[in-house]
Amino acid sequence: MRTPALAALFGAALLVPNAAFADEPMPPEQRPDFVLAPLADDLIDFTVETFTLDNGLRVAVVPDDASPTVAIAVYYDVGSRNEEEGRSGFAHLFEHMMFQGSANVGKGEHFQYIARNGGSMNGTTSEDRTNYFEILPSDRLELGLWLESDRMRSLEVTEENFENQREVVKEERRLRVDNQPWVPGWLDFYVQAYDGEGPYGHSVIGSMADLDAAEVEDVQAFFDLYYAPNNAILVLAGDVTRAQAEPLVERWFGDIPRGNAPPPVVIERPERDGPTYLETDDHHATAAAAILGWIVPQAPGAENDAARILAEILGSGESSRLYDRMVRTDATALDVSASIDGRRGPDLFMAYAIAAGDTPATELRDAVLDEVERLRTEGVTEDDIDAARRRIVRQQVERVEGNLGRAIRVARDFLYYDEPDRVNGLVARLNAVTPNDVQAVLDAYLVDDNLTVMHIEPIADEDAEDTDASEGGE
């Protein structure tokens, strides 16, 4: 799937006569007739084998011996959307707590084991999941499994570790949120796009007040509920087969007790009778910015596929409608983009622009809305969709070329949709999108009653209020 898949996106190379590089333009009749073939539905196609342990741990193996490495991805079905009122920030806190030691691994030793064996690792938290991953030489697979199983089985949830990591999270907020341009506005936008209510009604980093109020017993209860094998996905991708993996996974994870089933998460699309406008002053920003968002249906589903194509056409890259107008033609923006957030649902369609010069946020907003309306009026063509489709597929092919990218994609799809090989059907789903599908998304969802806008305006330091970031709410 590797090199042939990329070649299929762009067609075979053409041999062009040396005259093509002369100073004079080549006459039209001498130019090569370059026509891209349709993308084959099976352009992305790799093997995914699955099995489930008696304790509920779901496992996927993605064999590929192209390099002597193996990626390990562990996804826990817990993100900020699972947090109770008054307990925001716990999922993100545990991203840090999981490296503080377990029964057989000392504090910080997880990093050392991986690095000393030629590997790399990380972990992240989102609204919808928490993940941990490493990539190692394939003859060190059992090391990675032992490390991941030991902290799933016996994380050291102590008062000392909790206090230490609570302070780390506070400092992370100061550095990565409170003192970064535009970021506080982004967090407020994300929350208010869902009306500040329900599972998506608070930020991933959470409230420092909630963390300050927490007790170590609360933290232990959170771990016991969500960090259990029946609430996790394990994916191994690379130089490994199911026959090799299954006994090793059983050895290290098989006797970890099943936990209680966490409560279900129900998220409903906000119902409104008009747009929501927000504004904030930002003394770290050097220019204004505008963020616009519309709630759209989540994947899986044809509407989400059409919305993804629409975002690509509207604001992805220098060939997009927004870039051509706002950056290239009007010179009112330094950067502009549109994208789908990829939430488990409902999803969020977003457009974002950073101003050039003194352009106010309201002018950026109006330009984005005008381009949306122009798309609604004029529609999109098959050529628009084909170009967008090829860009999306190219990005996905590149992401799953490596073992780590493949493990992460399979784990996400396994957790969100119970479809570990879902990426194999991506091209077929995108091939099915028509101009009428895109028009339907525009008409049904990119409308005023479904719109949230955040205006961010820069202010001079002397005009900014003196606030203590460590005491902030969300």
Image (cartoon, rainbow, N blue to C red):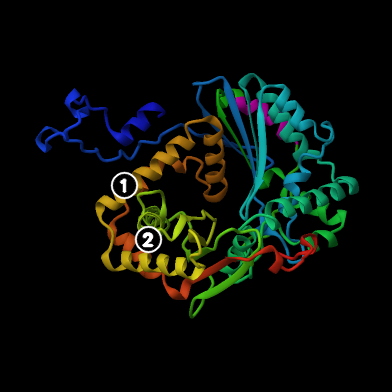
Q: How many numbered callouts?
A: 2
Helix, strand, or loop for circle 2?
loop
Residue tagged 1: 387
- Which of label 2 and label 1 is nearer to you? 2
Q: Position of residue 121 (x, y in %)?
A: 66, 33
- The amino acid type, in three-letter code, at marker 2 is Asp
Q: Neighbour class for label 1 at 10 Å: few (<14), some, many (≥20)?
A: some
Mark 1 residue type: Ala
**C-alpha distance separating marks 2 and 1:** 24 Å
Q: Residues within 10 Å of mark 2 (few under 14, many from 20)?
A: few
Q: Is residue 389 above or below residue 472?
A: above
Quarter of the picture holding the C terminus: bottom right
32 is within the stretch colored magenta: no
Q: Which of 202/14 is in front?
A: 14
Residue 84, given in percent of the width and then of the height, sits at 73, 63
**Rendered location of residue 148, percent (x, y):** 72, 35
Image check: 231 left or right of 435?
Answer: right
Q: Quadrant of residue 282?
A: bottom right
The reply to whether callout 2 and callout 1 are in contact (CB within 8 Å) is no
Span of residues in magenta: 245-255
Q: Is residue 20 left or right of residue 139?
A: left
Q: Is residue 268 visible?
A: no
At horizontal 35% and vertical 47% (from top left) the residue drawn is: 389
Q: Which residue occupies 72% across, 46% down?
A: 95
The majority secondary structure of the magenta stretch comes to helix
**Picture coordinates of residue 52 (x, y %)?**
61, 38
Rendered residue at 12%/38% (across/down):
28
Q: Nearer the viewer, residue 148 or 118?
A: 118
- Could you say whether the residue bearing mark 1 is in a helix, strand or loop? helix
Q: To which residue does mark 2 refer?
A: 330
